[in-house]
Image (cartoon, rainbow, N blue to C red):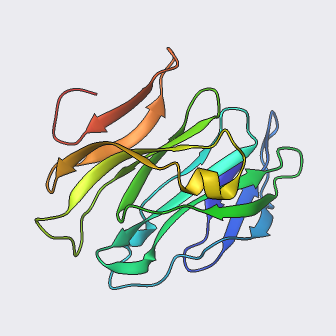
């Protein structure tokens, strides 16, 4: 599946990918939060990530400063046979959410922030984790842990699972992962 999300709506568009190519007709799921229009489209930055087993997706929107409705961080169920997205779980965002990755065993969700527009010198960027293993919404929401933080100006990039099963993150303007 190839997954996109419409800006300004709650629509996920899932396009089936087969050996014949990519379907031109999406499966549309109207679920979860919509990007809220704000003073820029910075809150359109973020990611949609599938869990390695394909049963979940995570979705975030970068947000703009203290404009809380412009921040998005959610986990959804995903039906790999139909392309439907369902059961949103809104997670506590860190303002400026940017990168996402599930752990290789699907039990954790990791995220990073990239604070840009309307943030101040006292803001920090974060690398954080949620424990999804309980399957209980309140337990998941309360499991958030900050793993690392950087003073404003230090920025985490996106998260990727490497071929060795480890999750890598790029620190912006550096030569290492």
* Rendered view: 33 above or below 22: below
Relative to residue 76, is residue 6 drawn left or right? Answer: left
**The furthest residue to the left:** 121
Q: Residue at x 47, y 50 (%)?
A: 144
Relative to residue 176, is residue 79 drawn left or right? Answer: right
- Between 90 and 161, the one lying in front of the other is 90
* Rendered view: 95 above or below 160: below
Q: Residue at x 66, y 32 (%)?
A: 52
- Between 140 and 98, the one lying in front of the other is 140
Q: Residue at x 38, y 70 (%)?
A: 63
Instruction: Please identify the quadrant where the N terminus is shown.
Output: top right
- The answer, for residue 173, to whether it is visible in the render is yes
Q: Residue at x 21, y 57 (%)?
A: 124
Q: Residue 122 location in percent, x, y?
A: 13, 65
Q: Residue 169 location in percent, x, y?
A: 35, 34
* Rendered view: 172 above or below 92: above
- The answer, for residue 1, to whether it is visible in the render is no
Relative to residue 68, is residue 114 drawn left or right? Answer: left
**The furthest residue to the top:** 164
Instruction: Please identify the quadrant where the C terminus is shown.
Output: top left
Task: Say how many tags the image has.
Answer: 0
Q: Residue 99 location in percent, x, y?
A: 42, 48
Q: Residue 168 location in percent, x, y?
A: 39, 29
């Amino acid at each position: 599946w190839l997954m996109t999300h419409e800006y300004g709506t709650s629509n996920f568009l899932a396009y089936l990918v087969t050996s014949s190519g990519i379907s031109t007709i999406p499966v549309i799921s109207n679920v979860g939060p919509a990007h809220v229009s704000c003073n820029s489209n910075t809150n359109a930055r973020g990611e949609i990530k599938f869990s390695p087993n394909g049963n979940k997706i995570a979705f975030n929107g970068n947000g703009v400063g203290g404009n809380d409705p412009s921040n998005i961080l959610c986990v959804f169920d995903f039906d790999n046979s139909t392309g439907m997205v369902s059961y949103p779980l809104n997670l506590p965002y860190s303002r400026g959410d940017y990168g996402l990755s599930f752990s290789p065993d699907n039990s954790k969700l990791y995220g990073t922030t990239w604070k840009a527009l309307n943030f101040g010198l006292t803001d920090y960027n974060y690398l954080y984790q949620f424990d999804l293993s309980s399957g209980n919404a309140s337990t998941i929401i309360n499991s958030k842990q900050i793993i690392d933080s950087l003073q404003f100006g230090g920025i985490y990039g996106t998260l990727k699972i490497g071929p060795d099963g480890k999750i890598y993150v790029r620190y912006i303007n550096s030569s290492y992962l």
